[in-house]
Image (tube, rainbow, N blue to C red):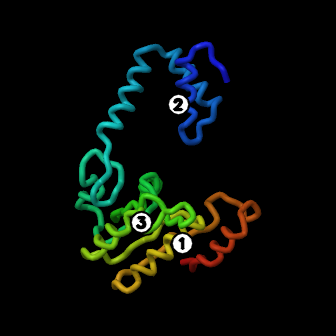
């Protein structure tokens, strides 16, 4: 779409490159900022620049952090004998929001995808194997239930099986509040396979 203002058009284009933001949402955001005035725009710009300057990757778990190692890795209240392996830092946010896990994390930085040229060497697997040698008793594989996520979990389970470590996989199934009729066959099958005893 053509805009009378080239600067407005550039901002709409920049916002629309963000995940989940289409052109109409990007346009609303850009027009909102214009209405707010220069001060609000400068605050947003400075916050984005601060993010780029201050956030880095933890050298231990590869989560986003401002300190290295991150606050999760250095928290003495967390159980350092359990590592939960996730694909990306956003997965840590989801697990932490649930408030039921108190161990450490390890971010792979993606999943195995031979068709896309992503191999073991492109992910933080070597670092995981080094970490588990330091008193880790359990590794929880929390990759997403996709073809690549399942393949990555199976690969890691195979590599970890002879190290005397318990290897578990997060359960999958029907979401809370969901109806059976609206779930796909694979989800229902996984829910049946992962059924538990009622206590």
User: Which residue is at a point 38% across and 23% down the rendered structure image?
Assistant: 43
Tell me residue 193's x, y (percent): 62, 78
Depicted 56 relative to depicted 87: above or below: above
* Disc 1 from disc 2: Cα separation: 35 Å
Between 27 and 184, which is closer to the camera in this rendering?
27
Identify the residue at image location x=71%, y=63%.
183
- Number of callouts: 3
Query: Which comes before the other along the chain, label 2 or label 3?
Result: 2
Q: Quadrant of the C terminus?
A: bottom right
Residue located beneath label 3 in the image: 85
Residue neighbourhood size for the residue with mark 2, other residues' Cα within 10 Å, grouped as few (<14), some (14–19), many (≥20): few
Residue 3 position in % (x across, y down): 63, 17
Above-or-below relation of 48 to 172: above
Residue 37's place in the image compared with 178, above or below, is above
The tag earlier along the polypeptide, 1 or 2, is 2
Secondary structure beneath label 3 = strand
Q: Residue furthest right?
A: 181
Instruction: Give the Cα separation between the discs numbered 2 and 3.
Output: 32 Å
Residue at disc 1, secondary structure = helix
Label 3 CA crowd tier, 10 Å (few <14, some 14–19, many 20+)? many
* Distance between mark 3 and mark 1 Cα atoms: 14 Å
151 w.r.t. 89: above or below = below
- Give the mark nearer the N terminus: 3 vs 1: 3
Q: Which residue is mark 2?
A: 14
């Amino acid at each position: 779409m053509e805009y009378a203002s080239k600067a407005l058009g550039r901002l709409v284009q920049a916002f629309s490159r963000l995940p989940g933001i289409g052109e109409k949402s990007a346009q609303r955001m850009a027009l909102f900022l214009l209405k707010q005035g220069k001060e609000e725009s400068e605050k947003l710009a400075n916050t984005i620049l601060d993010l780029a300057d201050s956030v880095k990757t933890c050298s231990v778990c590869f989560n986003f952090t401002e300190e290295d190692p991150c606050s999760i890795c250095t928290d003495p209240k967390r159980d350092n004998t359990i590592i939960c392996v996730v694909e990306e830092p956003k997965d840590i946010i989801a697990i932490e929001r649930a408030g039921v896990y108190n161990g450490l994390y390890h971010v792979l930085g993606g999943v195995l995808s031979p068709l896309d040229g992503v191999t073991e060497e492109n992910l933080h697997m070597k670092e995981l194997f080094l970490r588990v040698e330091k008193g880790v008793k359990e590794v929880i594989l929390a990759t997403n239930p996709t073809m690549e996520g399942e393949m990555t979990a199976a690969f890691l389970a195979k590599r970890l099986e002879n190290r005397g470590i318990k290897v578990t996989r997060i359960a999958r199934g029907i979401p809370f509040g969901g109806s059976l009729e609206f779930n796909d066959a694979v989800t229902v099958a996984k829910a049946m396979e992962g059924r538990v005893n009622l206590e």
